Image: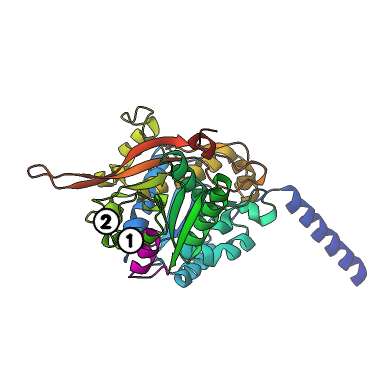
Amino acid sequence: MKKVLLVAVALVFAFTLAGCKEQEVESQGVTETTVTVGNTAPVSGALAFVGLPFNQGMQAYFDMVNADGGVAGRTIELINRDDGFDAATGLTNTEQLVEDDQVFALVGHFGTPTVGATIDYVREQGIPQVYFATGISALFNEAAEGNDRSSFPVQPVYDAEGQVMVARAVGDFGASKIGVIYTNDDAGNGILNGVEIQAEEEDVTLVKAQVAADATDMSAAALTIIQGDVDFIIIAANQAPASIAIKALNAAGNDVDVIVSYVNAAPTFIALIKDDIANFDVYANAWVNIFAENGVDFSDGYNLFVEEISKVDAALTSNPYAMAGWIAASFFVEGLERVGEDTLNWENFIDAMEDGPIDNPLGGVVSFENGSRVGTQSMSLLLATIIPAEGETPESYVFAPYADMETIDEILGN
């Protein structure tokens, strides 16, 4: 009798498993009326000027979607945990978002320290990560498989940007000897790797100077570059070290033009260097295109951003970090819309993200098809511009359009 009972129980268990396999179930963070996402980003402290507008841009996009009924009847809820741009805190926050808050996805996974510290963990979990607010080389993958498919980088990785910087130096400025000040971290080394690859292709000479990412004195590096008699300078560094490098170059008597990473293309960065760029121009890459081809009329995508972000703070309409957050949210929503009324789980969402190119609402297209995880690969060029004060109007700062969004081949005229 006991044997018969055990067999019966086993059969019931087997049929139950079979039924589970046939019926798709929704992933964590999903209810009939909501889908919850999260990120960890610095919304207080020294780098709050980056993290706060980024999150405001994301929230503005989600608010717009929610006001229209959400996606498939679900509104989107965003949980942010403040990490102060600290890797250890970022890892703890990410684990809490995934395991305690049970978010469906990480959207706008923020900053080189946190992304670097968590990339193995989140891929092991298999949770979707849509948009990384960094360009670290570890994100670059031309044929992702398995859990690596869960990552969806949108903005450029540093290596690819280094190649674009050399292309700009050669194609737009006729450079043949380029100075490179680079930080000894993922950002600096990643950009340098791309610089070296493209410099070899273009037969360009490099004069390199390494600095610590937290250095407060870069005078020796600046002197090395100037004594190298270069005709263009690349600064491979994030916000704070890039500004220190420019100050050091100015103090050493530099008169050669400089290009910095897209992560620095903000009025707040110009404010840091405004007294140091009288004798040379500073350019920055950009991977969004808010201007029409004539450089005057705003695009429809930017107009919508302006309309919605103005509801939060009108000062954010020209803030690139707010734009980046807006883009991050838009890519996530596109994935939701592609899943539609089907079961919302990680597998279906990842498949949907790979189902054809996705338009960037502020310019360009990114494709995740066939496991491609390389982010966007075309960039425009901006010029740091100081608008003089007039009457009671204070001095203002803007990165103005200088060259249209182009691929490396287009920049070089190939």
Q: Residues within 10 Å of mark 1 (few under 14, many from 20)?
A: some
Residue 107 visible somewhere in the drawing: no
Task: Give the secondary structure at mark 1.
Answer: helix
Residue 145 in picture, x, y percent from top left: 69, 52
Q: Amino acid at mark 2?
A: Ile
Q: Amino acid at mark 1?
A: Ala
Residue 279 visible somewhere in the drawing: yes
| 189 is within the stretch colored magenta | no
Residue 408 in picture, x, y percent from top left: 52, 40
Looking at the image, residue 104 sits to the left or right of residue 370; the answer is left
Quarter of the figure with the N terminus: bottom right
User: Vertical placement of 183 versus 171: above or below?
Assistant: below
The residue identified by callout 1 is: 48
Residue at x 38% of width, y 52% of height: 54
Q: Which mark is residue 81?
A: none
Looking at the image, residue 338 sits to the left or right of residue 155; the answer is right
Residue most toward the left? 391
Relative to the observer, which residue lies in front, 10 or 1?
A: 10
Q: Which mark is residue 273?
A: 2
User: Vertical placement of 243 versus 380: above or below?
Assistant: below
Q: Give the mark count.
A: 2
Residue at x 30% of width, y 56% of height: 254
Relative to the observer, which residue lies in front, 59 or 258?
A: 258
Relative to the observer, which residue lies in front, 277 or 274?
A: 277
The segment highlighted magenta reads: 212-226
* Tag nearer the camera, 2 or 1: 2
Q: CA distance from mark 2 to mark 1?
A: 19 Å
User: Vertical placement of 78 versus 342: above or below?
Assistant: below
Q: Earlier in the sequence, mark 2 or mark 1?
A: 1
